[in-house]
Amino acid sequence: MISSSRSILSILLIAEFILGNFANVFIALVNGIDWVKRQKVSCADGILTALAVSRIGLLWVILLNWYATVLNPAFYSSEVRTTVYIAWVVSNHFSLWFAVSLNILYLLKIANFSSLFFLHLKWKAKRVVLMLLLGSSVFLACHVAVVSLDVKFGMIVYEGNVTWATNLWHIARLSDMTVFTIVHVIPFTMSLTALLLLLFSLWKHLKKMRLSGIGSQDASTKVHWNRNL
């Protein structure tokens, strides 16, 4: 039962790896060729290309973790485990925040609100996205630092079973879980908020267009009625 479940999960993982790499490599190649031809790239295409590259890296890290866990456990030493974990944190971070930046950019470019603050952000959309990516590097630095401490104290506890190291390891593990939750909740909340605001703006626009259509239809009906009189 366990072997069959592992085989199914392995097949799904390999299929996801192949399809994900194909799609993301295609996106990166198309945008890269267009970049070479035009000698310039838009902000949205640049973020989309970076997002594709980060997801390719994430897929390779997941495949390496699967290989070391399922096929070659002897390869999965403490150093390799630490390297894979940190590589996953970095690639997952960029994958999340590039997606958030793309959502924010589309919101600022497409949505239309009368708020002065929103209009100010809309006017400086590229700078907003750049500041968002630079600000997210703080979360990345904190996450990598906490992960390194967690792994370091875990190795000390495993080798020597020291009481003070055990307490510090529990603190580091709790900090790792807390930082992990924060760095995933914040981009998810931002993406969800951007999506809802964009849908609300589009709904307002469609409602306004519908009312304009009804008004113009009523006006044409009145003109036709007056001509008949």
Image (cartoon, helix red, strand yellow):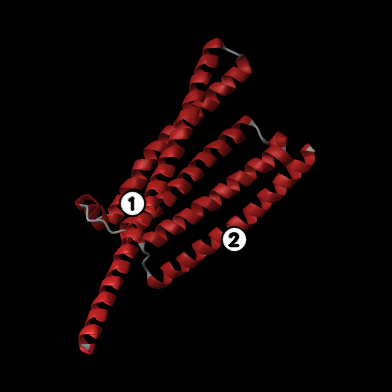
Residue drawn at x 68%, y 43% as measured from the top left: 67
Q: Residues within 10 Å of mark 2 (few under 14, many from 20)?
A: few
42 and 110: which one is in front? Answer: 110
Amino acid on which the number 2 mark rests in the picture: Phe
Q: Which residue is mark 2?
A: 22
Residue 15 screen position, x and y as percent = 67, 54
Residue type indicated by callout 1: Val
Return the residue at label 1.
129
What is the residue that sits farthest to the top in this orientation? 163
Give the residue furthest to the bottom. Answer: 228
* Badge 1 density bin: few <14, some 14–19, many ≥20, Cα 10 Å: many
Total count of labels? 2
State the image coordinates of residue 51 (x, y, percent, origin top left).
Answer: 47, 54
130 to the left or right of 79: left
211 and 11: which is toward the camera: 211
The residue under the point 30% across, 71% down is 214
Q: Is residue 33 above or below residue 4?
A: below
Q: Is residue 188 left or right of residue 43?
A: right
Q: Earlier in the sequence, mark 2 or mark 1?
A: 2
Q: Residue at x 75, y 42 (%)?
A: 5
| Quadrant the C terminus occupies | bottom left
From the top left corner, tell me how far across and down residue 212 is, in percent: 27, 70
